Amino acid sequence: MRKWYRLLQAGFILWICLCGLTLEVQATSRSEYLESMNAGVAQIVDPTGRAANAEAVKELAEVSEANGSERETDLVMANVQIAMNVRAEADEESDKVGLLYKDCGGRILERKDGWTRLRSGDLVGWASDEYLLFGEDAELLANDVGNLIVQIETDTLCVRKDPEPEAEAVGFIPRDEELEIVEVLDEDWISVDYEGETGYVSAEYVDIDFHIDEGETLIAIQKREEEERKAKLTANRGAVVVGGDDTRLLAALIYCEAGIETYNGKLAVGAVVMNRVRSAAYPNTISGVIFASGQFTPALNGKVARVYGGDIPESCWEAARAAINGETNVGDATHFRRAGNHEGLLIDRQVFW
């Protein structure tokens, strides 16, 4: 029987939590994979069930104490309801470098004066001990909130319907993807959660790790929030059924309001009109919105009507059709004006809000 399986089944690997080391379990080799932790989160691996983890840790601690060789774990867990600040220095006035969220964990790097310098994923900084758990408390929380995963170590891993080499394939997973473990069946097969169903993968082509959520740096938070903002701004608003005359009318207004702008500027104007059509605060037709009293100057001074009867550039037609089909780059904005005296989303030379 392979060495990694004997270690897993014995529950012996839980001593990692006490030593602050990471164990990589690879069925493709019979050598030991005991290396210094570099992932930033103390890891526990126990395929026989999480309920055994606390008891195993307790037994190992008792053995270590009896031998006079007890070592403290370097695992640390956040003890907050939402999130806590991680700072550049051990001082409440120091710059914030990131956040450690509820149930996130990390590795202790240094401790002093009621503060702990920790590493959690890419986040490195100081956190107040008031909001952290250490030792057995940290281990128990990690055991409760963490989960076993398999990491794919081959170009493409086959997920099968049954734990048999010739069983039907239900999916294929690329290298470096992760799947949550349901159960380690034996030294050859592992059951995993695949798209909400139980599938089976060969242990020969995967690593097994214990995963705990990690904190975020300010840079990562800003990047994520920017991506979320962009996604919200561009989320399709849903198509509106209109006639050809309405499409031409919208294209004419777009030409009048954004004819010299980029396509993004044209789409933004079209999206504002369609956002008003969808809103209960405005008329529910394109013509009603465009010719509403005091709204669009080109409509009121006759320019839209003149453009409507002539040739309209294809880019304006394209933007009109896209806006009618629900495309937007301004989210649910219902106003715009020349940039300069109003805050909002700047596109070309106009601001939208």
Image (cartoon, grey):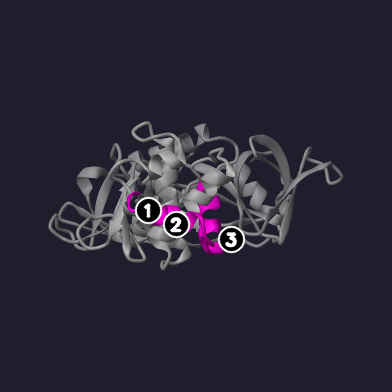
Q: Quadrant of residue 24?
A: bottom right
Q: Is residue 125 above or below residue 139?
A: below
Question: How far is the residue under mark 3 from the one under mark 2?
Answer: 77 Å
Amino acid at the residue labelled 1: Gly
**Magenta region:** 300-326
- Image spot of residue 295 (x, y percent): 31, 46
- Image spot of residue 98 (x, y percent): 29, 56
Closer to the camera, 87 or 254?
254
Mark 3 or mark 2, which is nearer to you? 2
Residue to which mark 3 is pinned: 33
Amino acid at the residue labelled 2: Arg
Left or right, 346 with respect to 114, comes to right
* Magenta highlight on residue 190: no
Question: How far is the residue under mark 1 from the one under mark 2?
Answer: 6 Å
Closer to the camera, 296 or 185?
296
Residue to which mark 1 is pinned: 302
- Check if mark 1's residue and mark 2's residue have beta carbons within 8 Å: yes
Q: Is residue 245 above or below residue 285?
A: below
The numbered mark at residue 306 is 2
- Image spot of residue 238 (x, y percent): 52, 40
Answer whether residue 197 is visible to the viewer in this image.
Answer: yes
Left or right, 335 with respect to 163, comes to left
